Image (cartoon, coloured by chain):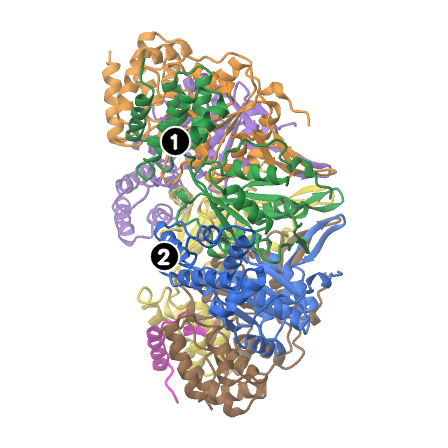
Chain colours: A purple, B yellow, C brown, D blue, E green, F orange
Amino acid sequence: MNIDTEQYQVKQEPFYQPQGNEIALYEAAYQRRLPVMVKGPTGCGKSRFIEYMAWRLGKPLITVACNEDMTASDLVGRYLLDATGTRWLDGPLTVAARIGAICYLDEVVEARQDTTVVIHPLTDHRRSLPLDKKGEVVTAHPDFQLVISYNPGYQSLMKDLKQSTKQRFSALVFDYPPADLETRIVATETGIDPELAAALVKIAAAARNLKGHGLDEGISTRLLVYAANLMDEGIAPREASRMALVDPITDDEDIRSTLHHAIDAVFPSH
Amino acid sequence: MNIDTEQYQVKQEPFYQPQGNEIALYEAAYQRRLPVMVKGPTGCGKSRFIEYMAWRLGKPLITVACNEDMTASDLVGRYLLDATGTRWLDGPLTVAARIGAICYLDEVVEARQDTTVVIHPLTDHRRSLPLDKKGEVVTAHPDFQLVISYNPGYQSLMKDLKQSTKQRFSALVFDYPPADLETRIVATETGIDPELAAALVKIAAAARNLKGHGLDEGISTRLLVYAANLMDEGIAPREASRMALVDPITDDEDIRSTLHHAIDAVFPSH
Amino acid sequence: MNIDTEQYQVKQEPFYQPQGNEIALYEAAYQRRLPVMVKGPTGCGKSRFIEYMAWRLGKPLITVACNEDMTASDLVGRYLLDATGTRWLDGPLTVAARIGAICYLDEVVEARQDTTVVIHPLTDHRRSLPLDKKGEVVTAHPDFQLVISYNPGYQSLMKDLKQSTKQRFSALVFDYPPADLETRIVATETGIDPELAAALVKIAAAARNLKGHGLDEGISTRLLVYAANLMDEGIAPREASRMALVDPITDDEDIRSTLHHAIDAVFPSH
Amino acid sequence: MNIDTEQYQVKQEPFYQPQGNEIALYEAAYQRRLPVMVKGPTGCGKSRFIEYMAWRLGKPLITVACNEDMTASDLVGRYLLDATGTRWLDGPLTVAARIGAICYLDEVVEARQDTTVVIHPLTDHRRSLPLDKKGEVVTAHPDFQLVISYNPGYQSLMKDLKQSTKQRFSALVFDYPPADLETRIVATETGIDPELAAALVKIAAAARNLKGHGLDEGISTRLLVYAANLMDEGIAPREASRMALVDPITDDEDIRSTLHHAIDAVFPSH
Amino acid sequence: MNIDTEQYQVKQEPFYQPQGNEIALYEAAYQRRLPVMVKGPTGCGKSRFIEYMAWRLGKPLITVACNEDMTASDLVGRYLLDATGTRWLDGPLTVAARIGAICYLDEVVEARQDTTVVIHPLTDHRRSLPLDKKGEVVTAHPDFQLVISYNPGYQSLMKDLKQSTKQRFSALVFDYPPADLETRIVATETGIDPELAAALVKIAAAARNLKGHGLDEGISTRLLVYAANLMDEGIAPREASRMALVDPITDDEDIRSTLHHAIDAVFPSH
Amino acid sequence: MNIDTEQYQVKQEPFYQPQGNEIALYEAAYQRRLPVMVKGPTGCGKSRFIEYMAWRLGKPLITVACNEDMTASDLVGRYLLDATGTRWLDGPLTVAARIGAICYLDEVVEARQDTTVVIHPLTDHRRSLPLDKKGEVVTAHPDFQLVISYNPGYQSLMKDLKQSTKQRFSALVFDYPPADLETRIVATETGIDPELAAALVKIAAAARNLKGHGLDEGISTRLLVYAANLMDEGIAPREASRMALVDPITDDEDIRSTLHHAIDAVFPSH
């Protein structure tokens, strides 16, 4: 089977601003091919970081958005019916193991807890993937590495990784960037005035304090970029902030009112 | 694969009366290709607005009525068995990404919460859709935009979008139109006397106050248009109102009686 | 695809006795192609009324008995494997939309709540049915109309139509016929003496008062017709009544005893 | 499709002892083709009665043992893949409707409650069965009749027929035969001494009094026949009774002890 | 279809030590082809007994290990896709009915309660098995007999056979063998010194008293044989006993300590 | 079917340090082909031990990572569609039985409790595996042995092996290695200074005391090896320890703080 490896290469350097020494830590883990777990709230840049590291290391990246309906076959592969009978089609995990890609399982905890056991033999000294249905054992390419993301913020008691899975990973903890860095990110990505960007970051700070007090999650950097985009298109700051920072994340009238006050304080009427 | 793009074009200007500056806000979001969430009660015109915007922007529109049984394959595509083996058939989301349509996922919260993760890579800087089963990564057409609708009124605790999904959208909040605008809509759409239309809008106002006090939702503009249609066919106003405004929405005798009083007050017997 | 429309025509006038002005109301709704919901207890004649209206309007009628296992594909259509590959087979809803039939979804609330969303685009100004799996949008024939039935009597909290579905219908409320009309129906349909028919109707009246007090539903007109049939075959009235009116509907000894008393009072022993 | 009707004919008169006028009542119901529900405890002879009536009326009998996994397709039919594509295979209900058989759905309440709606159009004036997946409406043969069995004894609240199904049937209530009749049945079927048979019937009487007081069901006539068979093979009456009447039906030590006493009283040690 | 009956013959006399008159009782039941239920705790020899009886009677034996995922099709048969279309493949129950085997459904209560109804027509006077999907009614071979096993010890309230199933069987109750018999079994099967075997049986007696007081089941004869095997391989009695009698059956520290004391008392240190 | 046995051979001696006489016990069990259960916490070396024993005994090893979605077919085999019809594909358990491999079912308790019954006939005197769907009974190769792993630490009440399964195994209990042995393992596997390894083992000791007091499991030897790897790549001991020992296993702030103190105590700042 000829796999088009090229399509998995990250061609352009993704815009990434380091928050600490996460790059060195990741590189050390990669040198030893330790599986890596990236933890942190929604929209803080976990996926962007992995994309950046894949670019930096020059390795192909295969991302799988995990979900509750994902079966082991979706990861590993399945038989398809062909004109001449059945034909095996590798799943993304198998492709990654064969070509030596970084395989990034995004929001892995969404997958059925017990289907995650298929990654076990790839995460210990065996570094192999048994394709039971095909009767083949794939030995991982020396460049292969497994990465998973995990948001500790809203995992329920019902959905958590098993210890026997967790204890196969080293972990990098992420959070929202500090205010000055986040301001720089918003301004650089959208082209708005850094002062306006700083104002948006102030609203985010207010919202992030509400986490656990009516908000499940704080406002992500991504939403700040949305608001800045709208403002750059000529929408008034208050309207842009409501549309991007408040209306998508909550229906609670009290929380909305609190957030509206935060917006009005930062963007006074003229 | 030749896709018949033409069938997704909105050929006639849909009848749409703006409630505020939602058209400008949507256009700004579209310029930046921000994903948009439209929120509001049943029958207040969310779908009509998206259809109007697709017509106004001259972009094809692909609407998907989401439901609990919808799998990721229903959105993304699947293999079909053909005379010569299996053949891949793009799902509506994939078609929209290829041809640059506005893809409108109606009542997205009905879909299994975790299947919604398939839209994630289309809603961030990647703007791509991995077809894992086909081994292809679709890069979205520059014109592609994702829109979802959401009714905050009757979402249960069990069914809500995840924050990691919500934080990928900007949002537009809709409500029933103000009385004079709604009167104009009812009269224009059905041809009945504006005074009769105004009377129907009064009944709706009474019912909408009952929301949360025995009614799950107020009477929608759509039902007012139904009542007006029946009156235009010669049905007496009281009968038409009961048939269109009361009988479809409630079996509760107390609520029925309250609504009947409201009808009788607005349409006194001759 | 050639559809045998003829088989859906109601060839003979069904026996139908109007209870009020439901015929005029239905005709007005049909003129405007408003979707119609018929509500009422088991066996009060809802299905018979729709059959009668289809005959009266001269339109084909396609009835679907809904059930919990019914999927959207059962309504809309699916691919079948053929000698030359897969072949699309329209479901009954699609057939009705193509040929301009009245499509009657019986006991629609039995269907999975969320699969009912597939009827939404057929019930608003779009009047279209997207066949996502086929990549085709069916525009409904001008004669097409959607009708659903609904029994408010024993819907549980778990099973109810969503407001976003309900608010797409006008509604006609049915009940058991008044005593003299019901007597006439029983006598006409079975040929028994009107006095015997009147006696059966009296038993039904007693039973219907027990609804909610040990009986989930009253005795339907259909069961009265069964009892009359048995009497017409020579079975003694008391035995016929027990066999048709009591034994099928309850296992509760108290209720049975009450109903036996009602029977004995109406048909005294000789 | 050529259906081998012959295999459904009951060739030999089944051994059946009437308990009352159930034969006349059934014949009247059959004349009018009323659907019939037979109710009664396990092993009291319901299935035997239907077999007897089919023999007496000279009609083919198709029996379906219902179960929770039975789908509508199991009753109605499905497409099978053939060398030349798909081929429709009628289910047992469809076969019965075509050839004019008595279709006996045994323990119908075991079937998924809502799949039972497929029998509705066969049980009212329509007497038809829509094969939605085939696009065909089968009109029932004039001889066709539907019969269901139902055991009111151990139906849970979760599993009951819906009123809209119940109200489509006339009903015949069965119970264990009176002592002298049951003695005659046991003696005739097995060839043991009527006195021994009478002793077994006495044990059954004791057990049936325990129903609801530790036993879910009384001892059936069938088990009495088993015990008589074992005795006829030379097994001692006490041992035969324990093996056939006690050990299969209960693990409760108190109940077992009570039943052993009843056995010892009836079959004193020599 | 040619069935290889030979493979179902029990070729060698299984080692079986009778506990009572179970052989005579079984033979009487077989003469009348009464269905038989064998009841008793795990590992007390139920399956061995049936194997022995099949050998003694010279009948083929088909054993099915029942489980929760077993469908009626797994028992009865299904269509397979072949080069020339679909081909029916008999399930083990159907094979047994055709060739006249003893069909032994092991741990039948594990099967979905309601799939067990497929065995009903084979267990009454009909002795037939309708293959609904094939449109064939299989009449059982005169030698066919149905046997089920059942462990009353740990059946939950959720999982029990229905009375309508239980009342189709005669029953044989098994328990652990008496001490001297069990000692003989252990010594004969493994070749160890009868004194050592007797010591193992003493440990089992202690453990069986803990049933219901921290142990779900006592130690089975099979585990005693395991311990004896390990001792015969040179493992010290205490170690062998812990490995075979304690570690497999409990994680509870108190129970383990109690069992260790019992072992130490029986095998004192030297 | 030609099975590539070679791929299941363990080619290189796995690094294994015995904790006690487990090697002798396993060899005795293997001589008698007793099924073996290996019990112990996550990452204590159970899988490594089995791999070592397979190498030592020179037998092929087939490992199956069990999971909740694993069906009996995944273990036993299934039909695949081929150009010439269906073709049977042995599952890993069947392959192991045919070629005489050690079949290791890892985390067997994850599999659906009742699918585990398919292993029963392989674990008693029969040593056979009925392939019901194929109509074949596989007699196990004389070298075949079944091994399962089991972690008593976090089994819920809902998920436990049935006694009728447990009582088919002898058991070997594992725990974390004693401190000096674990230090040697960490140093040997990674090449770091034994003093640093000893420090890591001290942190693990602290964490293992927290098991049941906020931690579901202690820190495994595997994670110590990860930390040592990172240190060997030049990461500071404190950072390496947090990344490998704390961040993967807990989100609880109190526990994290306790573990951070343990790390700081062992690796004081310079």
**Which of the labelled discs sits on residue E249, or is there none?**
1
Q: Which residues are magenta?
A: B244-270
Tell me which chain the residue with mark 2 is part of. Answer: D
Say whether residue A130 is visible: yes
Question: Eyeballing the image, is D16 above or below F205?
Answer: below
Q: Amino acid at mark 2?
A: Gly
Judged from this view, the residue extending furthest toward the front is D270
Front-lying residue, A206 or A65 = A65
Quote the CA–CA distance across marks 2 and 1: 32 Å
In the picture of the structure, the residue carrying the numbered disc 2 is D214
Front-lying residue, F270 or E9 = E9
The answer to whether marks 2 and 1 mark residues whose Cβ atoms lie closer than 8 Å is no
**Percent from the top left, x then y, of residue C127?**
57, 64
Question: Mark 2 packing: few (<14 Cα in 10 Å), some, or many (20+)?
Answer: few
Q: Amino acid at mark 1?
A: Ile
**Percent from the top left, x then y, of residue F223?**
37, 20
Question: Eyeballing the image, is C256 above or below E67?
Answer: below
Front-lying residue, A119 or B249 = A119
Q: Is residue B246 magenta?
A: yes
Label 1 sits on a secondary structure element that is: loop
| Callouts 2 and 1 in the same chain | no
